[in-house]
Amino acid sequence: MLVVLSGPSGVGKDAAIDRMKEKGLDIHFAITATTRQKRPSEIDGVDYYFYSLDQFTSMIERGEFLESANVHGNLYGSPRRQVREQLSQGTDVLLKIDVQGARQVKAKVPDAIFIFLTPPSISDLVGRLRMRNTESDAERARRIQNAYVEMEALETYDYRVVNHDNRLDEAVNQIGCIIEAERCRVHRRVVTL
Amino acid sequence: MLVVLSGPSGVGKDAAIDRMKEKGLDIHFAITATTRQKRPSEIDGVDYYFYSLDQFTSMIERGEFLESANVHGNLYGSPRRQVREQLSQGTDVLLKIDVQGARQVKAKVPDAIFIFLTPPSISDLVGRLRMRNTESDAERARRIQNAYVEMEALETYDYRVVNHDNRLDEAVNQIGCIIEAERCRVHRRVVTL
């Protein structure tokens, strides 16, 4: 089973995934590749695979990504082999990807499960992005602009999970429930890549 | 949202529902009407509405049931008004009904959510039915025969929840998760009767 988790920048996807890992959720968290600058707290090969633009584009040419996208001026991609290996072992895989990447996965793997993590409102999201210190002013402005576009993608997802302030556990529980429920489907969606 | 819970006789539907009530699951448990003999532990108007055959059939004639079925020689039915009132107040409703009744609900309310509680295996189920003391030998034999027919209905359900021996909480959690997940659907199934 392939689970796609998306949501606008700043909604709390990374925090949600960290909490899911802490809770020992029984799923493989796919590690995304990116050309984005590593943040001080991040570890290469754990949080992301950090590649140069040159490395990344040659991986695209070799078809090594299940999906790839340019988000806020950086490239992101999901290594296909990692996902395929887990699925072939019968392990469910969670992909944290943006709405462009999700659209590519939907075209290739229509039976994947698409979850959209959303803020209580767009004004709430803009507030959160304004508060962040991890980006430059220009990058923050770009992310805010992009949030509107990203929110429109909600309609193409299967599930919506609202991440209220200070209620991350509720959102994480709902994501866990969605995965648990999908495993109970009589006609299970079996995915091969 | 209308949730239908079915499963072969003896699989543990009543025990599952009792546990859900204990846990305070946020849903209205519809009370079924029946012509079956009240068991000593049961309370009229709480566990079931107990009616005479005459009362029951005149309710059928007046169209007061959302579904009704003859199960093991007794009539069962879901009072339509009770379900409609709850749904119109925005309260989700859970119907515990047999596979015949579920088929009728599916025809009238295709957007309902259909959950099938199943034993680990049919031989396990037959074993459980043989152990029960609440029926006569003849009724037990009829239930065992019927179990095979009921198990075939699984294919028409959305979700399958396995009720393993001594793991009722696991099954109850899965049912709770299915309801929680369905509430997160982007295109929520809204039901009117």
Image (cartoon, coloured by chain):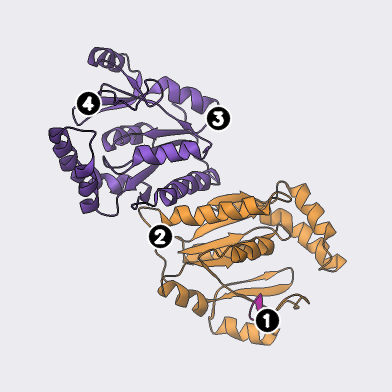
Chain colours: A purple, B orange
Q: Distance between the Cα atoms at labels 2 and 3?
A: 31 Å
Does the stretch in magenta take in B47?
Answer: yes
Q: Distance between the Cα atoms at labels 1 and 3?
A: 48 Å
The circle on residue B89 is none
The circle on residue A90 is 3
Sooner in the amino-acid sequence: mark 2 or mark 1: 1
Q: Is circle 3 on the same chain as circle 4?
A: yes
Q: Which residue is mark 4?
A: A74
The circle on residue B189 is 2
Give the image quarter of residue B40.
bottom right
Is disc 2 in contact with disc 3, using a CB cutoff of under 8 Å?
A: no
**Whether residue A4 is situated above or below residue B66 in the rendered picture:** above
**Percent coordinates x, y for residue B68 in the rendering:** 60, 73
Q: Is circle 2 on the same chain as circle 1?
A: yes
Q: Nearer the viewer, mark 3 or mark 4?
A: 4
Q: Residues within 10 Å of mark 4 (few under 14, many from 20)?
A: few
Look at label 2 and name its amino acid: Arg
Q: Distance between the Cα atoms at labels 3 and 4?
A: 32 Å
Q: Secondary structure at mark 1?
A: loop
Please state the extent of the stretch shown in magenta in the rendering.
B45-50
- Please give the chain letter of the residue carrying mark 3: A
Q: Residues within 10 Å of mark 2 (few under 14, many from 20)?
A: some
In this view, the residue farthest toward the right is B137
